[in-house]
Image: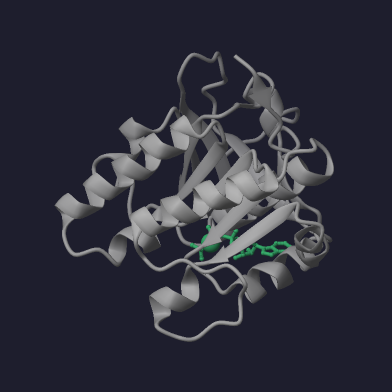
Amino acid sequence: MELVETGIPGLDKILGGGLPKGRTILLAGPAGGGKSTFGHQFLYHGIVSAGETGIFVSFDEHPEHVRQQCLNFGWNLRELEEQDLLVIIDGFSPRAGVSSNEKFQTPVDVDELINQLITTIDAIGAERVVIDSITALALSMASEQQIRREILKLSAVMSSLDCTTILTSEMAGTEVSRFGVEEFMSQGVIVLNYKFVNTLGVRSLNIRKMRGQKHEMMERPFTITKSGIIVHVDEQFYF
Ligand SMILES: Nc1ncnc2c1ncn2[C@@H]1O[C@H](COP(=O)(O)OP(=O)(O)OP(=O)(O)O)[C@@H](O)[C@H]1O
Ligand SMILES: [Mg+2]
């Protein structure tokens, strides 16, 4: 199986090389767990180091906030957008019911989103897609049944498009699958954790599954530094 580097130091090592190319991965974690940063880093690295163009669908935040946060890490997204190496699709403004000046927008409609993704993948030859988050997308739907149907459809279509896709998902408690299907429809699941040891907040990550791939099972600490996420794999770490 061909693997693609995440660009997250330490993670590729515990993944045995990277994420399975062309597959859909669920990235679950609590609020503030680092899900969006992970997604941004995966796309930025893909474009500047791996030569793979990308699409970021933002339902959680306005694209301007995404650009600003990335700039704090030294990742200039605007520059990549101007070169047609990256497309940011604004799903936030339509969801919030506010107008947007963004060139690319999507309503909260999975069929429409799929159409837009197909067109954009074709237009820029995208090989990486991040949808942040499926929780925001799902919570705008009418029923649990619809949520499950639409998430399954999105996942099936992404798998057929040959793009390495990350779907972020907010965990409310310890359940990875908030809507009962996410974990099973993805080829891989990475869980981000955030816990307090005495008064110190500690971030950690574990690979919960990666179909067809040998990977580490251990929970590994990670930090968010000024240049992005680093997973600590070499040093001893006690929780
Ligand atoms: N430039 C930075 N340097 C260091 N740490 C940062 C920086 N920017 C953000 N962080 C840390 O990352 C955390 C947020 O990460 P991120 O937005 O990726 O999480 P998230 O899981 O997407 O959160 P949400 O559930 O709110 O969408 C912040 O709370 C902060 O602790
Ligand atoms: Mg986020």
Q: How many marks?
A: 0
Q: Residue at x 45, y 57 (%)?
A: 133
Q: Nearer the viewer, residue 4 or 112?
A: 112
Image quarter where ligand 1 lies:
bottom right
Reply above or below: 219 against 176: above
Q: Position of residue 137 (x, y in %)?
A: 37, 61
Residue at the limit of the structure toward the bottom, as seen here? 99
Left of 50 or right of it: where is 160?
left
Reply above or below: 58 against 197: below
Q: Quadrant of the C terminus?
A: top right
Q: Residue at x 51, y 47 (%)?
A: 118
Q: Residue at x 79, y 58 (%)?
A: 80
Q: Position of residue 16 (x, y in %)?
A: 65, 18
Q: Residue at x 57, y 36 (%)?
A: 163
Q: Nearer the viewer, residue 155 or 67?
A: 155
Left of 158 or right of it: where is 6?
right
Picture quadrant of residue 176:
top left
Q: Position of residue 127 (x, y in %)?
A: 64, 38
| Residue 175 visible (yes or no) | no
Q: Position of residue 149 (x, y in %)?
A: 23, 45
Picture quadrant of residue 208:
top left
| Residue 50 visible (yes or no) | yes
